[in-house]
Structures are given as structure tokens and as C-alpha cells.
């Protein structure tokens, strides 16, 4: 039977204790330090509060459920994509086999959201998350299926690490490359600690306070009052009176009912002792304790006592930086290690897109965008991409402030005063470098496309690049015009450069070799042509 089919059995209905049939004599399950499955068989680890706590019962505490839910849903809802490093930066690798597994559908039974939500919940409760990696014969990953964390254990052997998992009554041994294992905090580098086991006392106290509150309002934890009778009641009469009174007056159902007292009886109410009234404070403290364990801001699990409009936004950003981001890094590094081939790892990587969660209010965002645009490290299209807007024509231009330059160098106006090309050269080199980087990045995308007519795509590329170089040179052009009264026309130089490049790219039998050659020489050639044009005007 194929292992993928065996793993699917885990999601079929089963008796609760069907998988807990391992022998008590098994040395891996000593009674002095029982495994989680054996502890859970008897209701979990009993705490000093008298409440049994395990990974399932802990979720009955609303604070634990809320903390696990908010972290699991956050990790599951973030876009998870695959990038490839190129000369032009990074680009999406939608064609990679693992892309659809991570972004869309890890297996035929789950969406990417439910898969990541499930594994992150395992990670938060058990301290480890496991998934079986199904592969074709060429080792290409084809599916990811969760493994139950209370039945899967890594083990160091002489030949390396193996994973043992139990599915019903069958034990299966898996190789490391067959298991996606995301561990939490741990000290052996092999598996993480279970937060529920470590903090069962705190969780047990919270559950005990919750149970106490339920009983308090259900029937009262102390007598709420006494009935005074002028005479002496027999034991039978006293019991009958107590039963009758409880049936009509005790609990929430008896609240506000009219009581009828006979034979001169009087009702004497008793105040609630302060130590019992303080259980509400205890419950509040336990909510904060759970927030501290899972490193979640209290307002995100319903505690708004100290939340204000001014600090909730900053707390939410801190939540992304200090709570969510470490989990994302664990995911990314394990995915990079297990789902990509050795020759892919230096250039292909998985990444969660969290930029949207780190954005502030609209006023703060637009102010930061204006600064980035003004000082040239973001283009209009860079900003539009962050705002989930489509790109626009001409939006890839980066502005250069004319009143700023490198420390120790003269200002742009001074640079062009005598039209010394040595002074102009740094500006021209920067413009040429940006242009060539964009050109090579576009050509690389065309080169990687399979089964398409590259000639037509290259022609369309150079048609799109018309005006890019001239627009980038506008600050230099204006500075020259200010000092000389003449304006160099760089259009002809741009047409010449684009025409030559298009001809070579469409006719070259080896586009990759041509791009490598341009990478080393084209910037200098463009700068030389621009300098000659400036000299031509000066003369």
C-alpha cells in the first residue's frame, strides 16, 4: 500500500483510543516519563488545581483557544509564494511545482489556508508540526499531508534522523526528506517543547477559575443566605425545607422569584466573601498569563482593559514583528530546506508576504511613500504594488533630487558648470546602470519562457523601453541647459542604443551569453555615447 494512501487513514473516523495500543513495556514509553499519548489516555497531566490538562482540554480555556486561533489564522492567511533571484531582483516562480502546493492546494483534501492553519495549530499546542511530502520518481514534490504531532516522533539513529509515525495500528518509518518538520522552541535541535505541557499549571488555574465561576453562578460557592425558624425542625423537616428551597430559589433559574415563608421563618442574606468575589480578577490575570505564553497582545484575545486607540495600532505592528515573524521564519527555512533541489537552493526561496500587515494608517503610509518617491528609492509602480494597485506606463522611473549628492562631492549645478565629463560620469553611470539592469531583467524573463516566440517578445520589450533612458536623463539635461543655454538631445542616442540592442538580441543564437557580455560592457558603452553627445553640444 502506498504511504500516501496510508496517511489518509488518519482523517477517517476512529475510536478515540484506537491508536494508543503501544506496549507499556516499550522502552520509548517508560512509566517514569510517559509519552504524550499515554498521559492523554488517562485524561492528561493533572495539575495542582485538580484539572487535567492536555493539548485537547487546554482549548476549552477560551484564552488558549483565542491565542492559538489568532496565530494560526494569521499564518494561514498570509500569501506564501516562491521567488527566484535574478539580475533584476526577485521574481515570482509560479511555474515551480511547489508553488501551487504552498499557495493554493497542498493536497486534494485541503486548501493552503486550512493546511497551514492545521500545522500552525499543531505547532502552538504540541510544539511541533509535521507533514508528509509525497514525491514523484524525479523527487518533484506533488502533495503535502499533515501528520498528527502526538503520533509522530523524530529519532536520531546511526545513519541519521528518521521519523516514526503511527497510523491506526501501523508504525511507519520515514526519511528526513519525506517529512516537513517545523519545530518550536527546543534544546536538542530535534523537536520543540509542548507549550501546553510546560505551562499546564497556568492553564489548569484558568480552567479551574472558569469552573469555579460556573458553579458559583449555578448554585453558589458559599451560602447566599440562611432561613431562620423560630422553632426547632426535625432532621427530616430540615432536609425537606432545604430541598424545596433549592428547587425554587437556587441557581440562575430561581433568581428574582418570589419566596413564600411560613411559620414565622425569616430570610437572612449573607455577603459574598472578598476571596470569592476576587475570582474575576483571577480570571483576568490568567488571560494575561496566556497572552504572555503565546506572545499575543491581550487586546487580540479579547482583553481590552489597557487598550486605547493610540496604542492598539502599535501593538498590532509589534504582534507581526515579534509574535508572527519568528513563526514565519521557521516555516520559510524548513520549506527551503525540504522542497527545493540542491541546485535550486542558492536562487529559489519561499517567502511570506507580510508588508500589508506592517502598514500604518493611510496618512502615515502616504507620507512615507512621498519621502521614498522624492529621494529615489521607490518608483510610482513600487508604491502602487504595495497598495495592491496595477502598474502604470512610465511608473518605473526613479527620481533623483538635484540638490543632493555624495558627501564630499560638488552639487549637480557645479558639476556641469564647466561640463567636465569626469564630474558628470557618476551621474551618467548610475542612469546607465539602472537602464541595463532593467533591460537584462526583462530579457531574462523572456529567456525563461518556454514554447513561445521570443523574437516578437524582444521587439515588444524594446518598444516599451523607448523613452526610459531619455526620461532618466532629464535632470542632467536641465542642468546642462541652465549653464549653457543649450539642451542636448539624447533621443537619437537612445534610438541608436535600442536599435542595436534589439538587433543583437533577436539575432543572437545564445541570448544568455549575450546578456553576460552586456552585463560587463554595456554600461560603459552607454556612458561613452552620452559623453560624446554632451561634448558635441559643448563644441
Image (cartoon, helix red, strand yellow):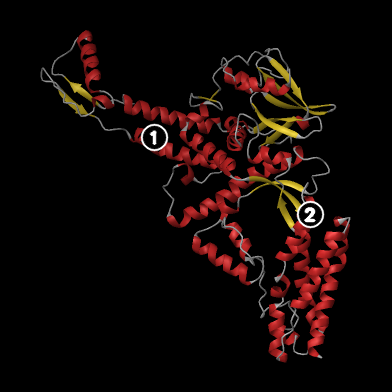
Q: On screen, 143 above or below 486?
A: above
Q: Quadrant of residue 445?
A: bottom right
In x, y percent, where is residue 145? 66, 29
- Residue 86 position, x and y percent, is 77, 55
Residue lying at 65% horizontally and 22% vertically, measured from the top left: 8
For numbered disc 1, what is the local secondary structure? helix
State the CA–CA distance, disc 1 to disc 2: 73 Å
Q: Nearer the viewer, mark 1 or mark 2?
A: 2
- Seen in the image, is 335 located left or right of residue 518? left
Give the residue drawn at x 75%, y 86%: 416
Q: Quadrant of the C terminus?
A: bottom right
Q: Image check: 13 left or right of 403?
A: left
Q: Earlier in the sequence, mark 1 or mark 2?
A: 1
Question: Up-down: is 392 above or below 147?
Answer: below
Residue bearing the label numbered 1: 279
Which residue: 53% across, 58% down?
Answer: 360
Mark 2, Cα crowd under 10 Å, few <14 / some 14-19 / many 20+, is some
The disc placed on residue 454 is 2
Q: Is residue 141 visible?
A: yes
**360 or 101: which is nearer to us?**
101
Q: Nearer the viewer, residue 335 or 185?
A: 335
- Image quarter of the N terminus: top right
Q: Quadrant of residue 464?
A: bottom right
Residue at the image point whose x is 23% and y is 28% from the top: 255
Count of numbered marks: 2
Amino acid at each position: 500500500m502506498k504511504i500516501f494512501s496510508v496517511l489518509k487513514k488518519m482523517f477517517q473516523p476512529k475510536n478515540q483510543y484506537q491508536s494508543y495500543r503501544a506496549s507499556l513495556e516499550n522502552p520509548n514509553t517508560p512509566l517514569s516519563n510517559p509519552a504524550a499519548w499515554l498521559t492523554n489516555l488517562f485524561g492528561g497531566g493533572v495539575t495542582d488545581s485538580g484539572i487535567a490538562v492536555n493539548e485537547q482540554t487546554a482549548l476549552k480555556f477560551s484564552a488558549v483557544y483565542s491565542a492559538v486561533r489568532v496565530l494560526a489564522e494569521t499564518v494561514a492567511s498570509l500569501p506564501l509564494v516562491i521567488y527566484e533571484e535574478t539580475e533584476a531582483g526577485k521574481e515570482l516562480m509560479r511555474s515551480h511545482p511547489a508553488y501551487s502546493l504552498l499557495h493554493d492546494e497542498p493536497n486534494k483534501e485541503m486548501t493552503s489556508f486550512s493546511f497551514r492553519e492545521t500545522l500552525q495549530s499543531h505547532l502552538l499546542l504540541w510544539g511541533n508540526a509535521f507533514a508528509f511530502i509525497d514525491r514523484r520518481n524525479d523527487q518533484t514534490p506533488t502533495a503535502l499531508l499533515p501528520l498528527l504531532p502526538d503520533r509522530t516522533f523524530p529519532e536520531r539513529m546511526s545513519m541519521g534522523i528518521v521519523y516514526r509515525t503511527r497510523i491506526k495500528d501501523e508504525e511507519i518509518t520515514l526519511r528526513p526528506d519525506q517529512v516537513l518538520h517545523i519545530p518550536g522552541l527546543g534544546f536538542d535541535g530535534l523537536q520543540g517543547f509542548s507549550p501546553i505541557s510546560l505551562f499546564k499549571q497556568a492553564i489548569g488555574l484558568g480552567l479551574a477559575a472558569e469552573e469555579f465561576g460556573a458553579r458559583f453562578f449555578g448554585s453558589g460557592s458559599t451560602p447566599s443566605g440562611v432561613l431562620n425558624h423560630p422553632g426547632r425542625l426535625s432532621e427530616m423537616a430540615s432536609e425537606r425545607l432545604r430541598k424545596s428551597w433549592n428547587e425554587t430559589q437556587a441557581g440562575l433559574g430561581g433568581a428574582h422569584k418570589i419566596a413564600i415563608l411560613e411559620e414565622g421563618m425569616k430570610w437572612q442574606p449573607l455577603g459574598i466573601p472578598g476571596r470569592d468575589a476576587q475570582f474575576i480578577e483571577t480570571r483576568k490575570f490568567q488571560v494575561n498569563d496566556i497572552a504572555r505564553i503565546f506572545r499575543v497582545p491581550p487586546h487580540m484575545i479579547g482583553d481590552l482593559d489597557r487598550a486605547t486607540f493610540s496604542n492598539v495600532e502599535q501593538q498590532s505592528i509589534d504582534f507581526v514583528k515579534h509574535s508572527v515573524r519568528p513563526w514565519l521564519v521557521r516555516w520559510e527555512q524548513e520549506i527551503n530546506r525540504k522542497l527545493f533541489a540542491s541546485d535550486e537552493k542558492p536562487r529559489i526561496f519561499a517567502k511570506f508576504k507580510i508588508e500589508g500587515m506592517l502598514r500604518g494608517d493611510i496618512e502615515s503610509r502616504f507620507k512615507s511613500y512621498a519621502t521614498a518617491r522624492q529621494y529615489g528609492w521607490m518608483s510610482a509602480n513600487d508604491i502602487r504594488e504595495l497598495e495592491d494597485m496595477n502598474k502604470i506606463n512610465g511608473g518605473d522611473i526613479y527620481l533623483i533630487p538635484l540638490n543632493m549628492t555624495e558627501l564630499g562631492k560638488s552639487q549637480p549645478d557645479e558639476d556641469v558648470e564647466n561640463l567636465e565629463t569626469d564630474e558628470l560620469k557618476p551621474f551618467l553611470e548610475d542612469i546607465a546602470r539602472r537602464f541595463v539592469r532593467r533591460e537584462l531583467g526583462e530579457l531574462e524573463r523572456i529567456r525563461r519562457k518556454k514554447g513561445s516566440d521570443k523574437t516578437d517578445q524582444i521587439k515588444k520589450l524594446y518598444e516599451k523601453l523607448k523613452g526610459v533612458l531619455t526620461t532618466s536623463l532629464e535632470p542632467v539635461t536641465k542642468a546642462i541647459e541652465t549653464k549653457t543655454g543649450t539642451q542636448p538631445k539624447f533621443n537619437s542616442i537612445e534610438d541608436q542604443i535600442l536599435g542595436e540592442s534589439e538587433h543583437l538580441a533577436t539575432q543572437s543564437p545564445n541570448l544568455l551569453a549575450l546578456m553576460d557580455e552586456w552585463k560587463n560592457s554595456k554600461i560603459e558603452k552607454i556612458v561613452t555615447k552620452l559623453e560624446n553627445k554632451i561634448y558635441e553640444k559643448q563644441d
